[in-house]
Amino acid sequence: MSRPGRGGPGWLVSAALAAATAALWFAPGPRAMLPPSASRTECAEVVEVDDSGVELHGLIAFGTERLKVRLPDGRIAEAHNELRAQLELDKRFDVGDTAIVEIPPNAGPGDVLEARDHWRLGWAGVLFGGFALFLCCFGGWTGARALFSFFFSCLAIWKLLVPAVLSGHSAMWSAFLAVAVLTAAIVFVVAGPTRKGVSAFAGSMLGVVSSLALAEFFARAMHVNGATMPFAQQLLYSGCPGIDLGDVFVGATILASSGAVMDLGMDIAAGVEEVSRHSPGLGMRDLFASGCRIGRAVVGTMTTTLLLAYSGGYLTLLMVFAAAGTAPVDFLNSTLVSAEAVKTLVGSFGLVLVAPFTALVAAFVFSRRGRKAAQ
């Protein structure tokens, strides 16, 4: 296998990924399960806010916030913002904000519009543009290829994985196939079709398979039904009553941990490649031992990283239990915490397993026996 370079196989892989990304961009998105709305949305500037119809019940606001907004054509219209005492869904507007307003069909000049949400994509575009610029400046061509991988991953999840699950396919196996495709695309675009890329891909997939088996077993054994995921119940009432939330939970678990697994697999494969490059006479056993030592040095921080990433998502839940004085044995046994424990421990288990898997594959690929087999 050749080293990625200008005009080499690495460029062919990058070109193939760019073509696949373009094809996904123009492909249709998920099919709506409910009848489409006849209303249209516009961005409007909030010019006046009237909170006289809003009541405060403790920390919760309830009622109707009346707004006057300036539409793109310059007209001033009245809009209502309904507050339903749900902090995670309610929004409040100030003068000068940009609101997304829903305009019903055949709306007249005096009709009241509905303020659906804040317009956030402007600042999100600034943030993403800064990220893309820094990534390309710092990483050069490798950073640009990583950006292609980022686009491809987003589109693959939205236009391949989500529609497959909504159409009735198993979420667990759909997520597994999506992870396999994404791992191959990202690894081979970043590393090229090299021995390092093959080692990282094979080791990562062995870790993903292990995570899949563990997530399936322990989610069923611990009676984690998947309803703990955000908007799970709303999904059932959105035209998808037959979706198995437990199956979705397992698929989401391996999808969430696949990035860290891929990262560790690439680290170990790159480390074994460097050892082999500086000591080409080493055999498979010595290269495997070197890979395991590299894995032991990295896996400790990686598992802690995964723990912190997951715990950040349910920090408020832990604070609720602490404020209520709930005993640790009680809240650790709760459905919500058990679901997060399965995610964290299965992901960490996959990380621990991917280290020896990748070290073993890389040791064979970079050993003299592996080099002869590749010739």
Image (spheres, helix red, strand yellow):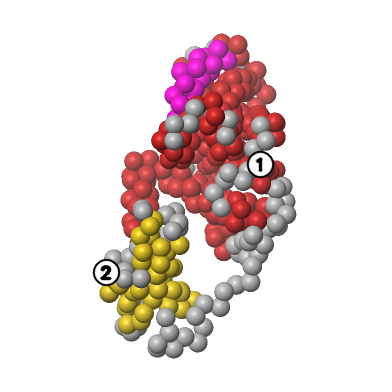
Marks 1/2: CA–CA distance? 44 Å
Q: Which quarter of the figure is the N terminus placed in? A: top right
Q: Nearer the viewer, residue 362 or 60?
A: 60
Q: Which element is circle 2 on?
A: loop
Which quadrant does the C terminus fall into? top right
Q: Answer above or below: position of 52 versus 158.
A: below
Please check the rendered image and state whether residue 292 is part of the magenta-colored stretch, yes or no: yes
Q: Residue at x 44, y 31 (%)?
A: 325
> In the visual, does 155 lie left or right of 144?
right
Residue placed under numbered mark 2 in the picture = 95
- The amino acid beneath tag 2 is Val
Residue appearing at x 35%, y 60% in the figure:
56
Q: Residue at x 56, y 38 (%)?
A: 336
Front-lying residue, 48 or 360: 48
Type of the residue with mark 1: Asn
Q: Tag 2: Cα neighbours inside 10 Å, few (<14), some, or many (≥20)?
A: few
**Which element is circle 1 on?**
loop
Q: Position of residue 13 (x, y in %)?
A: 56, 45
In the rendered structure, which segment of residues is drawn in magenta?
288-305
Q: Which residue is mark 1?
A: 225
**Per the image, is 31 magenta?**
no
Q: Residue at position x 56%, y 52% from top?
A: 231
- In this rendering, the answer to whether 30 lies above or below 2 is below
Relative to 314, 242 lies left or right = right
